Structure formats: structure tokens, C-alpha cells
Amino acid sequence: MTSPVDLTDPAALQAAFRAQGYVAGDALATALRLVPALQKPLLLEGPAGVGKTEAAKTLAAALGTRLIRLQCYEGLDAQAALYEWNYARQLLYLRSAEISGGRVDDGELYGERFLMARPLLQAIQQDVAPVLLIDEIDRADDAFEAFLLELLAEWQITVPELGTIPARTRPHTILTSNRSRELSDALRRRCLYHWVEYPTARQELEIVQARLPGIDAALARQITDAVHALRQLPLGKPPGVAETLDWAASLLYLHRGHLDADSIEATLGAVLKLREDQLLAAPTLRGVAGRAEAG
Amino acid sequence: MTVELPAELSAQITTFVARLRVRHGFLVGPGEAADALRAAGVVDVLSKRQLRDALRAVLIAQPEQTRIFDHEFNTFFRAEGGLAPPELPPLLPETEAPGAEQETETTPRKQQDGEGQAPAPAPPTPGEEPELTTVKAQPDSESNDDPDDSDGDLQTIQTRLSPNAGTGGEVRSEDGDLRELLRAATALIRAVQLGRSRRLRPMTRGPKLDARRTLRAAARTAGDPALLRWLGRPRRSPRFLLVLDGSRSMGRDAALLLRFAHALSLRTRRVEVYAFSTGLRRLTPYLRQARPGQPLTLPDLGEAWGGGTRIGENLLQLARHERERVNRDTLILILSDGLDTGEPDILERAMRELKARAGRVVWLSPLAALPGYQPVQRAIQAALPYLDALLPAGGMEDLQRLGRRIAQRRE
């Protein structure tokens, strides 16, 4: 494998991730290393905004390979995920053959030049194994999941008119799910599994500092502590790491040096996105502001 | 990339995988064991943490399994530094997680208990249970809820159906009764229409052009798309899963609902019926066998009928072992009075798992039909947060209103 990262060394992968601004825990780093080694897909589950999608993007950057992404949605079918024929061009071809009096060969009409590769077909046709991100698989329906099984087990795609297209290289596949629907056991069995939890306060501080190198250390700590206090509350939509970073970026943009009541009020929309949550969190945030002003 | 593992460690990992499967019901087989060995070859096996992270990524498939896995791993690979002591007895009672123990040993223990608690297969006395009497048969605790075993049971039914058979366990559906039940079944199916699928299917008329098939047709008409083909969104038809409490306290109501299930299975194929008392049993094959208007004959249901109640364990077994039958198109109807002898937290776990998979979960209670009813039974209390509706099931009238009541609860 000719990748810039030595995957047999756990520290090397974590360092490469950190260089991209992604702080990966030990367990996640091990799970990611197993993806190329076992050539199995990895299913990442966890609350929204903990960096599941970002992990796949960072893996692609760390490996120096392409990222091919398939966003799932209900009703996603083979045409959007695998391939589609270019019908307009096929029709034109048929008409021109008719005018010039030539015979239309089925093999030519359904040849590769009329085939439009969608993400999954693209992913298995690369010369260098790409990272294939199948994002939010829980949003697709059971039928799509069942149909994905063939690809994940056999690494080949069958086009009835063309025959079976085997994978040139097996993509490093990452699936993410927010658990809005229970996935089938069959799919789970074909995947490695890792549950991505919210980072600890220390990890989150590292993330903020890695992503926003200019931030004041005291402000970064106040932000991560506040977010951790917020996650203890029974919120409708608890803030993820993405919200923490947004919050920190907003405060940085507004040139706020610490998290006082005024700054919180001005930037609260970056971290709590439901009116009910903002009301519920008001006492906690007053405490946070009090501590920030005192310290 | 992979390194040759010491034979001792390979054997330990294989044993560990088997242990997770047998004790905790993890869905791991030889394929996962092979992957676990390969994964161990990738990481530094002298680091216990790396070995744990690698094996965990391979062997678990649900977040809830993390805790069980970590506990088992720590007890199994106890020695510092990675390699476990040479031999660990496979079953150490004191090393088991209290929560985990209940999960794993549910099935075997239940069978043992069932043998002890199930009513002795004595000849049924007519008149004791006018609605439903069970046939005396060989106690076959092995064949519980095993669909593959239905062949043997079908033979039993056929013998029972012959006029020479002795006392039969029959649930009679009287004339007129069936017609009312069918009407109630139709109303229920109508009420839970699920709308249209998001997925497009070829149809004779539809809102969207099927370019692929149109082009196929155009190739025959010299490239002229004269024949247009269409795609449309088909209706999603609901599935029903009925779980009947067949315990002694439920005899009459369970029999009525069983006949209702029969009527439902005449209206749609997508019906599954289970009965439980101390054990769980799938009844669907027997319903398929029964002819409309004829008495419904069931074999000896053993621990699934006429005993005590273990709602939680049986629903958990249903959620775990029959989970493929439950999806988002499924309406689960649980009939029980909620008078349970088991632990409510097991029931809660079962309800949570069922709710996560099913479209809707409705609990029918004959007690709820009584005036001034309060849902105070322990089982109902535990289940209530996961229910879409708790509805009365006191008799035919309640069944006929079932469809309308469920439709109302949707909003």
C-alpha cells in the first residue's frame, strides 16, 4: 500500500489525523486502521455532530486518496447510487442510426460510453482505493440496505446489459448512522462497528485548539466547559462538536475575550438551536457567565 | 501486514468469540472469529488496550453491547500485558455481569422453568375452559417457536383433525362471529394504511417517466419513443404482529383475539401471531392451516398457554430472536392484562427494542375496558412510555372500534 501514513503504527494514524485538525481517540484510531487491513467497511454510529462524517473525510486526506460520498435518503435507488444510462444520448444515437440507415447493435447502445457511473460504481472503478463514505445510511430504506449488501460482500456490481463489473480496488468504506432507524443485522454483520461518543472535555479542548489555532486558551476552556455543562441537560438537540466549533468561531469573529453574559446572548444561536433548549439552559448559562466573569 | 499470532492467543480469541455468542447472544460466528484473528494480527497484541479496541470493532454491532463486551474482555483477558492465563474455566458464575446474566440465560432457564411450571399435560377436562382447551401431546420443549419444526406439528394437527381423534384443543369460531371479526379486521387494515412508498416501481400509469424501459421500447420503434412507460409509488401495506398473553388469567380474551388474528390472516397475508405464557410460541403456521368457518385447532401449546405470565422475558425473546419480522411497516398488537410475575426492567428493555424497530406498538388490555381503569399494573407502567396507544379489549365491540381508535391516536 502506497499511502503517506503507515497504518501499522497507531500513533502515525493519530498524528496524521491531528495534522488535519481531527482528534481521534484510541479506539476510533484502531477501528480505522482495521478498515484497510481487514478490507471490511466500518459502521460509525453516534449522536449528531460528533464528527462521524468528518472522520471519513480526514481518513481520505490522511491516506492521500479520493473521497467518494453517497448521501442516503428515503427512496434512494440503484439509479442514483450505482449507475444510470444516459437516455438522451441513447435516443439521439438511435435516431442518427435510423437516419444514416445503419443497424443498431444492442451491445453498442448499452456500451460503456452511455453509462453514467454514480458514487458506488465510481468507487470500485478507481485505480487507487478511495475512501467511500455512505453517509446517514439510516435514512435510506430497508430495500436499499439489502441491495447494498451485495456490494459490501462481493465488491462487484452487476449491470444487466453489460455484465458484472468487479472492483478494481476495494474502497475503504465508512458508513455512518444517526440511529433514526434500526439497521438490519445482516448489514451490521458485514461491518466493523464503532460507537462515536461525545469527546471528553479535554479532547474537545484539543479539537477547538487544533481547528482554531488563534483562540485564547482561557476562552477555549470556558467554551468547552460550557458545552459540557449543556450536554448534561435534557436538551432536545444537544450541541455536537460542530456546534462547539461554530460557537468558538463566532466568539473569535466578534473579538470576545471571555464568555460573559453579553457574549453568550449574542452567540447563543450557534450552539443551541431550539427555543425550548435556550430557555431550559438559561440558568446553566448564567452560572457559566458568572464563573467566566469572576475568573 | 498481518503477523502470525501465537497459537495460544488464537485459541483464546476463538474461545472468547464463542463465549460472547453463547453467553450474551452476540451474532458472531466463524466469519467473525476469523476476522477477530486477522484484526489481532494488525494491532500490537502485547497492548491489552489495542487488542480490546480491535476485537471490539469486529465483534460488537450495537452500542448496548459495548459494556458487556468490555466486561467480558476484562475478565477473560485478565492478565496484565495482554496474554491471558493459560486456561480459564468456561463458566465462572462470579465473573458475570448482573445485567448480562439475565440476558444470556433467559432461554435455557426459561426452558427449565417451563418444564417445571407448565401445567402437567393432563387430559383436559371439558367445561373448565369452554373457549379453549389444549390437546394433550408429548411435551416438546425443544420445538418452541422454531418455525422449522412446524412439519412435525402439522402432522400432529392432521391427526387431531381426523374425526377419530380424541378430545381436540379447539377454538371454535361460531357462525356470525366470523363475519363480525372479518369486518373488524377490514376496519383495522383500512385504519392503518401507511401511504405510499418513496420508492418508484414500474406501473402502467404513474407520475414519472420510466426512461429506461421507454428507451428499450424505443429501440424497437426505430428510436422513436412511441410507447411511454411509467413509474409510480406503490402503496405500503402494513404488517401485523400479534402477541397474545395466553396465561390463565387471560383465557377468554386471548381466545377471542386468536380468532380475530385468524380473521385478519384471511384478509391479509402479512400477519404473524405469537402466544406466550411462561414460554413463547409462534402460531402463524396453525392459523394458515385453519379453514374459514372451521374450528381453529391448535396443538398443545405447552408453556405458551394456560400458565403464569412472563411478559418481559417473552417479549425480549421476541425482540431478539424474531426481530426480522418487525420493521417500520409493522403494527405490533400486544394483548395482555399486565398482571406479570417477571421483572419490569426486562419488559422495559424489550419494549424499547420493539419500539425502535416497529412502526407502531399498541397494547390491548381487557382490564382497560372496565370503568375507572387506571394503568397501574407494573408491566403496563413499564411499557407505557413506549406505547403508541393503550386500548381496551373487552370483547367484540372493542375489536370493531380498534381500527378507528388506532387511527385517532395517530394524530
Image (spheres, coloured by chain):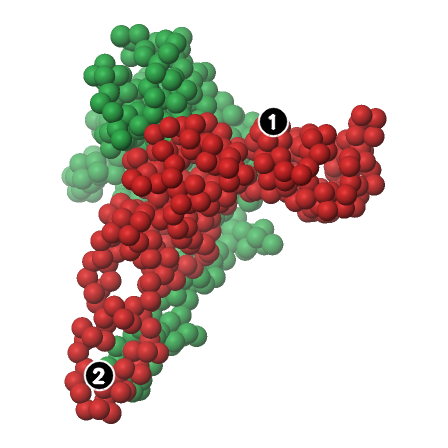
Chain colours: A red, B green
In the rendered view, does A20 fall on the left or right side of B91?
Answer: right
Q: Dot 1 corresponds to which residue?
A: A202
Pick the front one: A77 or B274: A77
Q: SS class of the residue under badge 2?
A: helix
Q: SS class of the residue under badge 1?
A: helix
Q: Residue sitting at 37 percent across and 71 percent down?
A: B231
Q: Residue sitting at 35 percent across and 40 percent down?
A: A3
Pick the front one: B320 or B366: B320
Determine the image quadrant of residue B143: top left
Determine the image quadrant of residue A287: top right
Mark in front: 2 vs 1: 1
Residue B220 — which label? 2
Task: Give the class, few, some or many, for how many residues have Cα within 10 Å of label 2's Cα (few <14, many ≥20).
Answer: some
Chain letter of mark 2 equals B
Q: State whether discs 2 and 1 lie on one chain.
A: no
Query: Which amino acid type corresponds to the residue marked 2 in the rendered image?
Result: Arg
Q: Residue sitting at 23 percent across and 17 percent down?
A: B6
* Quarter in which the C terminus of chain A is drawn: top right
Pick the front one: B259 or B49: B49
Chain letter of mark 1 equals A
